[in-house]
Image (spheres, rainbow, N blue to C red):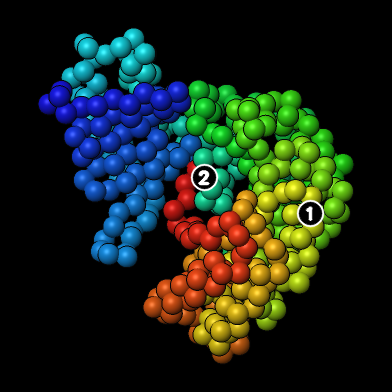
Amino acid sequence: MAANITINVQPYHLTIAEAMRTIVSFDGEGRLIVAFRDGINYVRGLSGDVLQKRVLAPGQKERRKLPDEERRRVLAELLTWSQQMIEHIAATASSTERDWFERIRRWDVDRLEAERERFRKVYKPISILPPDQYRALVLQATEGCSWNRCHFCTFYRDRAFRIHSPGSFRTHIQRVKEFVGAGIGLRRAIFLGDANALIIPQPRLRELLRVVHEEFRIGPQADFKGIYAFLDIFGAERKTLDEYRELAAAGVRRIYLGLESGDETVFRLLNKPGSPAEAIEAVRTIKAAGIAVGIILLVGAGGERFAHDHVQRSLAAIAAMNLGPEDIVYLSPLIIPTDTPYLAQLQAFDSPPLSEDAILEQFNQLKQGARMVAGPGAKVVIYHIEEFVY
């Protein structure tokens, strides 16, 4: 069996594999982070949640967070397997590998599960990130969402909006660093949370960014390559070109805006703040300051009645933004929570939700259209919110 076991040691993670049938990776603290077994992928977040992903059929993938009992069972199986593999090769391992093995052996299921409570003492729930930031280090300069009234979103309903003071933000950062420990090496960017952190008035935002730079090295040659954040359209309109230039100088590399739809009626149905026209103007200002953007469109927004206008006017808005090589257009299939006003809004407009086949068709229309109009080098990618775990 030992001949089939391979170890891959990287600066910030170690991977154990057996004939490529079972693969488990650990961070610098020795915590299990990702695994592949029996055709199933597992991702364990800092929060302690475990996301399971597997292909059910061509074009059909299951994504779900494991409930408590199943999560503990899966973790126990993966840790037991890892310990067995380590025992098989420990005698011939290098000193570097043996050091990793010691870190890995410190963890059992109970200790991994205890991390869940530690996480809750450091962070408010981290509801969502853009896909390219799933491995960022999240620093919650704000908590919650300053708008928090979009008809389709329930991510931040459980908390009031709050902006940290410089002192409380530094305390938060120090707790984050202590909690993440040596696992911080896997984090290559700073994501400033929560929902629209850059809405913070510029004088306070300037102070908070200064704290970030005092706590971390940020830059092209540094540990962290840049700072990233969400911003709603209404908040984006409030900032001037000079203020965005100041953010660029402070290391802000990309700002993510939920356009959701370029159609004014659909936009209002979703109860978004601002307007598609304001979004276009804000994006142009942000890009003029040298900051890239990530634009999110909801696939299926507006239902059947507005499907054509949603596609055509969303593509027109993307075309007007003059996107380029560092920009991303995200196409996110709309997941409709049952406890939001969105379904009632669709009913009021006599516009039933799209079927699964219609959602797929609209996704392809938006993908093909966005690739044509987004500008040279801009990326167009899918954004499955069900694939997120932090």
First in residue order: circle 2 vs circle 1: 2
Instruction: Say which quadrant the N terminus sits in.
Output: top left
Q: Is residue 163 toward the left or the right of residue 348 in the image? A: right
113 to 264, vertically: above or below: above
Q: Within 10 angstroms of label 1, few (less than 14), some, or many (20 or more) residues?
A: some
Residue on which disc 2 sits: 134
Q: Are marks 2 and 1 in contact (CB under 8 Å)?
A: no
Which residue does the image show at 54% across and 34% down from the upper left? 187
Q: Residue at x 82, y 38 (%)?
A: 206
**Foreground residue, 11 or 353?**
11
x and y, in percent, of residue 112 in the image: 40, 31
Q: Position of residue 150 (x, y in %)?
A: 65, 67
Whether 65 is drawn above or below 170: the answer is below
Q: Quadrant of residue 253?
A: top right
Q: Amino acid at mark 2?
A: Tyr
**Dot 1 amino acid type:** Ala
Observer-nearest of 390 and 123 = 390
Say which element carries label 1. helix
Q: Residue at x 76, y 43 (%)?
A: 248
Left or right of 260, for residue 142: right
Which label was assigned to residue 288?
1
Q: Indicate which label's residue lies in the foreground, 2 or 1.
A: 1
Residue 125 or residue 207, whichever sits in front: 207
Judge whether residue 154 can be spotted in this image.
no
Within-10-Å neighbours for mark 2: few <14, some 14–19, many 20+: some
User: Where residue 346 sits in the image (x, y, percent)?
Assistant: 57, 82
Q: Is residue 195 left or right of residue 101?
A: right
Asked whether the viewer can see residue 32, the reply is yes
